[in-house]
């Protein structure tokens, strides 16, 4: 089978690259094995919350040039300010067209989202039912917070949210309340209603009658000036439709927090991108895994001629260009052996760390990040990787497969995925080697 | 302030391991009033960090017939009185090409001379019984080895003793003794959770503090030399063997593979360490290497099996030379300090094994009861433990689909009848180990569970393949409901659990363990922002934040 471009991995980086390729009129395939990190993500787009040295960033746009100068190895520094923000703008438009409007602060500041443990995490662009608290927290306008406990739902605990929130100094004087609400549809189920996961509740609440009963209950406990914290229990396959309805029926200010996995907030993003990709004519090979590739010498560089997958066995898939968006350890983009870490498909060069005991910190939740999180593929400025020191000129690396940053500590996972996915396609199109 | 609570009892037991809790039960059954203290949770010392092997005695038959004899005797007793803690798996002693096959007859002869049944098997017979055993074996001998769940054993001891009026204080450390001349009359203690001091006065004090027993003796100005020998083990993701697998040769490193509920354990290495290191045990990369390499010789599949975690314990070996030279005992060491040192009111019971705990308790309680003028005979070898009563003679079930069955196996059917039977009570929190809300409520209210790590020891929640990834979040919420915890405290319990778990994961942080760790970190730090919870309300939280500006 022959394509213009083939993308390995269907996470946020892979879809970004895939959608951009389709826009450029390329015949494109995404091959993706298993769930991407989005299934466990906040569904917000983190741009940049901390420097590698741990300083807090409130406005990524304002400090971008200084950051790029000081941390040249960071993927953002290679992409450059213009393209980073162009890509985010583009992503925002794409997602809006798929029914998920994302917004950010007008002045370009990060905002805080309230987490399922009642702590605050800095992010940049969020879905409509994420209440954006200012990073300059003293400026918040919150009067009262109501945290909703869904009766018998164990994957979200409202007391943890409220008790931790109330310890934040800026919230000292505001009222934070816990309220239990039952969902009528829980009774009369064949299975034990106390074992439902968020995705099961989403199925119940997609019923019009159920959602209006639920709305009636919420109206009794909160007023529009309150922030109503709800676990993410709607939108499995129907995006924001149910939440929009709930908002219409109640007029309340809803703040959704992800529950124990799966996170419906993240799934919404993946489903939206995947639908767009298919509608726009992309070939999505889901549940297949790229196993190896054929490389050929091309001057003093290498060229990836074709790849093989588990399902297609010995039948090669060829393309002019390839994008690697296979994620990190969790997504099997890397594999850790007893004494070394490898990229399993092409054996690309990594910025690896020799001794296993240096892969991690002593404490799990330490103020310093775990070194294994920054392990990734070494690339040139065009994000071409190397195999045994030789550049592969038509393969581009994106997202969490890249070296040089820590997505959690620096709060930049999805931002790097989007901007590098976008940038790689630019590079690919510029690539003199493009011969379609 | 300044008020110190005082308690009085007949016997004060220091240490809530297998030994201490067995003594607690023995005293209680003889009608002796007693209190037990542990600086941590029950079974959190060496008792919770070993192989859990119910020796048949075969391992010691050739080298130490006295130990072998004790083992086979206690093996038979525990199968009767603690059937819910025992899995009668049987064990194989295999001979590999690199071993001397002639050792087999020496071994079989030594076993039969202490009364251990043996059955010689051909390689084909052994493979049929245990398909995962190394197929290149030259021969095997089957013996009545089994497995013993130390957590369940301690919890049952405590449950039974409490029925007869005994009291327990966990998270309470003995800091010094109260003396009246040449007599110990009590101990000064500190509750490490509340930071409150208290005193317990007792006619007799028993030191059952295992490897920490040396410290306890020091509080009484007595000198007892102990030599800690560290042993490390690996937990495998699933049960790869049905029978215990040993090597038929003199005991060596990493040569026992023990199945246990849903997992298997390979161990142990053995290394003498300095006494100052006993509270900071570390499994080294090299030990992990040895365990995998040697373990794969017992069952080659081990090399391809995911490793869940690593842990280490210290064997509490005692020097019984009395100060001249070094004579380390691997057996039971009972020290009557009145006789040995002229200090009355204190008895130490050290050394021994997990599976000889009942015997050690009987020996100790005999000595102490006599001093108290109590003539009641020991009955711990006759009376089944709670939980064992109803299931006695039944083959214990392996992991079953039904929570009530799993729980009955853990706590006995009587206890399960006390569980909340509503839909909520029956709902499952930990799918790997089939732990229900009702079981957790019971554990929090009845089994002295104060945190998620205690809960893990009582119920196996989070011990299976997921290692508590998601179920501990659900369980921590239940501490708000049943344990009168605030939401802030219960989130700290969650973090405490994940930090404890990390200790066992670090040594094996590769392959799937690293994948899982990345996932856990994303969920709890990336998504949930857990690291900030510990800062809330502390001075560090108010520290001036450093901003990155132009
Ligand atoms: C559990 C988890 C939660 C996260 N939560 C957040 C969050 O809340 N916010 C945030 O900003 N970032 C989050 N991230 C960080 C994440 O790294 C980036 O934000 C972003 O999601 C990475 O996207 P990606 O496309 O690079 O990789 P992934 O989302 O990991 O996608 C890689 C995909 O490639 C597939 N794949 C791998 N190898 C092959 C192969 N050989 N053949 C075919 N397919 C293959 C995988 O199955 C997977 O579907 C999270 C990461 C993880 C692991
Ligand atoms: C690696 C290894 C493998 C083993 N395998 C087996 C096996 O397969 N089968 C077997 O039968 N045996 C085995 N053993 C031996 C067995 O584990 C121990 O002999 C047994 O657990 C000792 O129990 P204990 O109750 O005496 O001590 P511990 O369990 O150590 O109990 C002592 C308790 O005292 C408490 N304590 C200490 N100081 C104080 C204080 N100041 N105040 C209050 N409390 C205090 C501690 O917290 C601790 O809980 C093994 C040992 C090791 C190290």
Image: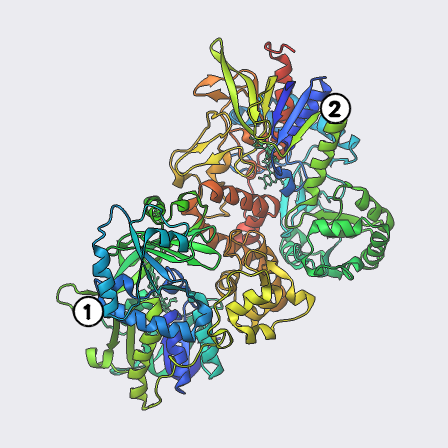
Which percent across, then down, holds residue A147? Answer: 72, 56
> Residue A290's image quarter?
top right
Tell me: residue B260, above or below residue A285.
below
Is residue B488 visible to the viewer in this orientation of the structure?
no
State how far apart marks 1 and 2 are (Cα): 81 Å
Residue B73 found in image quarter: bottom left
Would you say B434 lies left or right of B392 here? Answer: right
- The image quadrant where one finds ligand 2 is bottom left
Crowding around mark 1 (Cα neighbors within 10 Å: few <14, some 14 to 19, many 20+) is some
Identify the mark at residue A281; answer none if there is no mark. 2
**Is the residue A295 above or below the residue A149 in the image?**
above
| Residue B126 image offset from top left, x and y in percent | 36, 54
Query: Splitting the image into 4 quarters, where does residue A424 fall?
Result: top right
- Residue at 36% x, 51% y is B124
Q: Secondary structure at mark 2?
A: loop
Q: Which mark is residue B320?
A: 1
> On the rendered structure, is A268 left or right of A184?
left
Res A107 label: none
């Amino acid at each position: 089978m022959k394509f213009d471009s083939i993308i390995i991995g269907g996470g946020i980086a892979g879809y970004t690259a895939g959608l951009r390729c389709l826009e450029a009129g390329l015949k494109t395939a995404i091959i993706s094995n298993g769930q991407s990190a989005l299934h466990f993500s906040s569904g917000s787009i983190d741009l940049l919350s901390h420097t590698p040295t741990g300083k807090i960033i409130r406005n990524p746009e304002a400090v971008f040039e200084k950051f790029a100068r000081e941390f040249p190895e960071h993927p953002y520094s290679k992409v450059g300010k213009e393209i980073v923000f162009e890509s985010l703008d583009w992503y925002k438009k794409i997602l809006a067209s798929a029914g998920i409007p994302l917004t950010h602060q007008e002045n370009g500041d990060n905002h805080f989202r309230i987490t399922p443990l009642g702590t605050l995490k800095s992010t940049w662009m969020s879905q409509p039912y994420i209440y954006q608290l200012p990073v300059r927290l003293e400026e918040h306008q919150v009067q009262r917070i109501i945290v909703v406990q869904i009766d018998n739902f164990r994957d979200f605990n409202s007391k943890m949210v409220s008790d931790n929130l109330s310890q934040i100094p800026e919230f000292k004087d505001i009222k934070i309340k816990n309220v239990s609400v039952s969902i009528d549809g829980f009774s009369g189920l064949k299975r034990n209603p106390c074992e439902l996961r968020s995705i099961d509740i989403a199925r119940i609440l997609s019923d019009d009658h159920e959602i209006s009963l639920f709305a009636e209950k919420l109206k009794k406990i909160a007023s529009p000036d309150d922030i109503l914290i709800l676990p993410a229990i709607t939108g499995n396959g129907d995006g924001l439709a149910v939440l929009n309805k709930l908002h219409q029926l109640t007029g309340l200010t809803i703040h959704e927090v992800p529950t124990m996995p799966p996170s419906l907030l993240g799934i919404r993003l993946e489903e939206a991108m995947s639908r767009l990709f298919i509608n726009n004519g992309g070939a999505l090979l889901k549940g297949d895994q790229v196993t190896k590739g054929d490389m050929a010498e091309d001057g003093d560089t290498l060229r990836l001629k074709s790849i093989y997958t588990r399902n297609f066995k010995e039948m090669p898939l060829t393309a002019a260009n390839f994008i690697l968006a296979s994620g990190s350890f969790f997504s099997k983009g890397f594999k850790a052996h007893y004494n070394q870490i490898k990229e399993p498909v092409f054996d690309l060069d990594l910025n690896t760390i020799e001794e296993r005991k240096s892969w991690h910190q002593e404490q799990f939740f330490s103020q310093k990040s775990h070194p294994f999180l920054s392990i990734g593929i070494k690339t040139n400025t065009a994000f071409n990787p190397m195999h045994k020191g030789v550049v592969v000129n038509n393969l581009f690396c994106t997202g969490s497969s890249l070296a040089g940053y820590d997505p959690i500590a620096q709060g930049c996972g999805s931002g790097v995925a989007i901007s590098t996915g976008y940038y790689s396609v630019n590079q690919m199109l510029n690539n003199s080697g493009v011969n379609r | 302030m300044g008020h110190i609570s005082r308690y009085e009892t007949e016997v004060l037991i220091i240490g809530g391991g297998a030994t201490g809790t067995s003594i607690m039960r023995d005293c209680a059954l003889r009608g002796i009033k007693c209190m037990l203290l542990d600086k941590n949770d029950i079974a959190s010392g060496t008792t919770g960090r070993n192989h859990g092997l119910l020796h048949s005695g075969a391992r010691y038959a050739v080298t130490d017939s006295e130990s072998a004899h004790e083992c086979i005797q206690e093996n038979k007793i525990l199968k009767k009185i603690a059937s819910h803690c025992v899995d009668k798996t049987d064990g194989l002693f295999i001979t590999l090409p690199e071993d001397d096959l002639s050792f087999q007859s020496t071994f079989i002869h030594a076993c039969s001379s202490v009364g251990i049944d043996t059955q010689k098997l051909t390689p084909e017979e052994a493979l049929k019984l245990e398909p995962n055993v190394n197929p290149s074996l030259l021969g095997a001998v089957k013996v009545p080895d089994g497995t013993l769940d130390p957590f369940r054993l301690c919890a049952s001891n405590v449950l039974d003793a409490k029925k007869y009026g005994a009291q327990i204080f966990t998270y309470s450390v003995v800091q010094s003794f109260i003396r009246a001349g040449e007599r110990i009359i009590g101990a000064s203690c500190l509750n490490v959770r509340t930071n409150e001091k208290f005193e317990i006065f007792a006619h007799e004090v028993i030191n059952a503090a295992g490897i920490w027993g040396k410290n306890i003796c020091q509080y009484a100005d007595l000198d007892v030399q102990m030599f800690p020998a560290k042993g490390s083990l690996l937990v495998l993701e699933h049960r790869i063997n049905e029978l215990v697998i040993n090597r038929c040769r003199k005991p060596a490193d990493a040569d026992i593979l023990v199945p246990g509920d849903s997992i298997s354990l390979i161990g142990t290495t053995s290394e003498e360490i300095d006494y100052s290191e006993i509270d900071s045990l570390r499994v080294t990369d090299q030990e992990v290497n040895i365990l995998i390499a040697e373990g794969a010789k017992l069952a080659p599949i081990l090399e391809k099996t995911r490793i869940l975690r690593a842990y280490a314990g210290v064997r509490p070996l005692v020097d019984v030379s009395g100060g001249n030279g070094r004579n380390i005992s691997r057996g039971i060491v009972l020290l009557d300090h009145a006789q040995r040192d002229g200090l009355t009111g204190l008895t130490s019971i050290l050394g021994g094994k997990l599976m000889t705990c009942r015997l050690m308790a009987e020996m100790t309680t005999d000595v102490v009861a006599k001093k108290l003028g109590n003539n009641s005979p020991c009955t711990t070898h006759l009376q089944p433990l709670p939980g064992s009563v109803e299931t006695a003679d039944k083959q214990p079930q392996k992991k079953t689909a039904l929570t009530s069955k799993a729980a009955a196996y853990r706590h006995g059917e009587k206890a399960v009848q006390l569980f909340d039977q509503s839909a909520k009570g029956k709902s499952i929190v930990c799918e790997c180990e089939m732990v229900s809300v009702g079981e957790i409520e019971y554990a929090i209210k009845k089994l002295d569970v104060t945190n998620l790590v205690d809960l893990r020891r009582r119920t196996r929640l989070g011990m299976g393949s997921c290692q508590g990834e998601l179920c501990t979040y659900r369980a921590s919420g239940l501490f708000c409901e049943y344990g009168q915890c605030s939401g802030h405290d219960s989130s700290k319990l969650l973090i405490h659990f994940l930090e404890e778990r990390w200790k066992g994961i670090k040594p094996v942080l590769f392959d799937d363990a690293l994948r899982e760790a990345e996932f856990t970190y994303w969920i709890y730090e990336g998504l949930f922002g857990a690291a900030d919870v510990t800062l809330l309300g502390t001075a560090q939280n108010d520290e001036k934040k450093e901003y990155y500006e132009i």
